[in-house]
Image: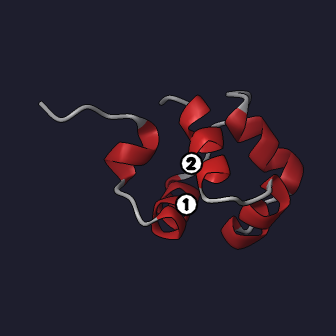
């Protein structure tokens, strides 16, 4: 997973860490840890983020299409 993409998409859509964390149901510190690669977000959180940003899970995690 490309953790830098979590920050890239958040900033692209103009959200703060606190706003995204609240939407995803996690603490701001937990979300900060996701962005820094210190903690792995659950699939539930990833789905919520993809929905928030109107992108696919593949795009969110940086998966290349074969």
Vertical placement of residue 17 versus 8, above or below: below
Give the secondary structure at mark 2: helix
**Residue 60: which disc?**
none
For the residues labelled 1 and 2, the Cα–Cα distance comes to 9 Å
Classify 64 as above or below 25: above
Q: Position of residue 57 (x, y in %)?
A: 38, 52
Residue 41 or residue 58, whichever sits in front:
58
Residue at x 36%, y 45% (from the top left corner): 59
Q: Is residue 52 above or below residue 7?
A: below
SS of the residue under disc 1:
helix
Q: Residues within 10 Å of mark 2 (few under 14, many from 20)?
A: some
Residue 8 figure quarter: top right
Q: Identify the residue at image location x=47%, y=30%.
A: 1
- Give the label, 1 or 2, closer to the camera: 2
Q: Which residue is mark 1?
A: 49
**Left or right: 46 as drawn, with respect to 34:** left
Residue at 55 percent across and 60 percent down: it is: 49
- Number of marks present in the image shown: 2
Residue 62 horizontal/vertical position (percent)? 39, 34
Q: How is the image coloured?
A: secondary structure
- Quarter of the image for the C terminus: give it: top left
**In the displayed structure, does residue 17 sit left or right of residue 49?**
right
Q: Residue furthest left?
A: 66
Residue 14, position as x, y percentages in the image: 69, 59
Q: Residue at x 67, y 66 (%)?
A: 24
Query: Which residue is tagged 2?
Result: 9
> Which sits earlier in the primary sequence, circle 1 or circle 2?
2
Whether label 1 touches label 2, CB < 8 Å: yes
Q: Nearer the viewer, residue 45 or 51?
A: 51
Mark 1 neighbour density, 10 Å: few (under 14) some (14–19) many (20 or more): many
Residue 10 image point, x, y percent: 64, 51
């Amino acid at each position: 997973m490309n953790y830098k993409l979590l920050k890239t998409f958040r900033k692209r859509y103009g959200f703060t860490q606190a706003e995204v964390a609240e939407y995803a149901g996690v603490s701001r510190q937990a979300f900060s840890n996701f962005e820094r690669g210190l903690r792995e977000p659950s699939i539930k959180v990833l789905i919520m983020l993809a929905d928030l940003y109107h992108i696919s899970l593949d795009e969110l995690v940086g998966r290349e299409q074969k």
